Amino acid sequence: MKGLKGKNVLVTGATSGIGEIIAMRFAQEGANVAINYRKRLEDAENTEEKIIQKACGNMASCGVKTLPIQGDVSKEEDVINLIDTVVKEFGSLDILVNNAGIQKECPSHEIKIEDFDMVLGVNLRGAYMCAREAIKHLLSQNSPGVIINISSVHEIIPRPFYLSYSISKGGMENMTKTLALEYADNGIRVNSVAPGATITPINREWVDDPEKKAVVESHIPMSRAGTSEEVAAAVAFLASDEAAYVTGQTLFVDGGLTLYADFREAWSA
Ligand code: NAD
């Protein structure tokens, strides 16, 4: 896709699921990729190997650089270090993908406040801190840049028993729009990609259970769950020059989930 070759990209939570596939997609487009991981270096090295294989077959002949970086996005000092390290190692940061995310199921009247804070701390506060540090860097270089926030259909669909998750993604929508408006004049574009039900480890409860999977898919107008590759394609588009005039938007990659399958049949006179 236009304008991605040679760009420096940071993907948070890049060692599994959607983040890993986004990292691979950028490498395939010829971009250098910083792979943020929270805990295990082995996971990042594993992702690094897959990225190199996918992008160019082997490490020796690969023009694309990869950089595993440890950091918990809910911790301010880790986030500052994350952006500093990318800039130091790659020379600059052009594209940030705020992908790291967690969820916790609980009836809303019983949520422990530490759990509430933890989900908001990663999904919203963490994404904001990464955006803040990336924007500081871009402004200091007088460079254009792109921020993509991985949101969710729950940006607009309420999700009972997952209150903190819903709030975090709803907040992300406003953050995307506010940052897009505030920095449009600086050439910094900010958009969200909102996946629907996507086959990744976060959904291990239903992806490996055919009956539960069928129930999930019955709510999706296109009658199937999505893939991380389909999400990554939207991210690559929004980060590329093909989307040079797009900012402040959410692109739903959800097989029509936000159109509400239950309303397919006429339900009122
Ligand atoms: P996943 O569990 O495979 O990936 C989440 C990643 O975030 C993991 O690599 C994890 O280590 C990382 N992470 C968690 N806490 C972190 C922290 N504090 N600091 C750094 N990294 C951290 O799940 P996924 O489905 O690939 O989710 C990726 C994103 O997509 C999330 O933001 C999620 O909300 C969003 N999303 C997923 C779906 C879906 O159906 N899979 C749907 C909508 C939105």
Image (cartoon, rainbow, N blue to C red):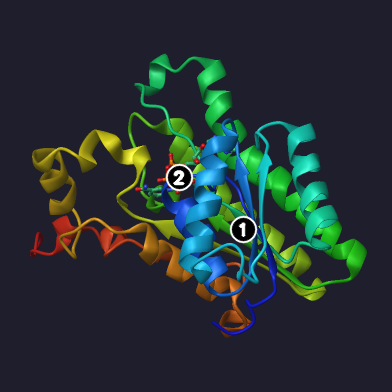
Q: Nearer the viewer, residue 259 or 252?
A: 252
State the residue position of label 2: 16
**On the picture, is 260 further left or further right than 229?**
left
**On the picture, is 30 further left or further right than 79?**
left
Give the residue type at disc 1: Thr
Which tag is nearer the camera, tag 2 or tag 1?
Answer: 2
Q: Nearer the viewer, residue 238 or 61?
A: 61
> Which residue does the image show at 62% across and 58% down from the upper left?
176
Q: Earlier in the sequence, mark 2 or mark 1?
A: 2
Badge 1 residue CB within 8 Å of ligand 1? no
Give the residue type at disc 2: Ser
Q: Image quarter for residue 245?
A: bottom right
The local crowd at label 1, few if under 14, some if 14 to 19, many if 20 or more residues have their Cα within 10 Å, is many
Residue 199 at x, y percent in the picture: 30, 50
> Which residue does the image show at 18% across and 46% down from the upper left?
216
> Which residue does the image show at 47% across and 55% down from the upper left?
50
Residue 128 at x, y percent in the picture: 68, 46
**On the picture, is 215 further left or further right than 180?**
left
> Which residue does the image show at 68% across and 36% down from the upper left?
71
Q: Can you say which quadrant of the picture contains the C terminus?
A: bottom left
Q: Secondary structure at mark 1?
A: helix
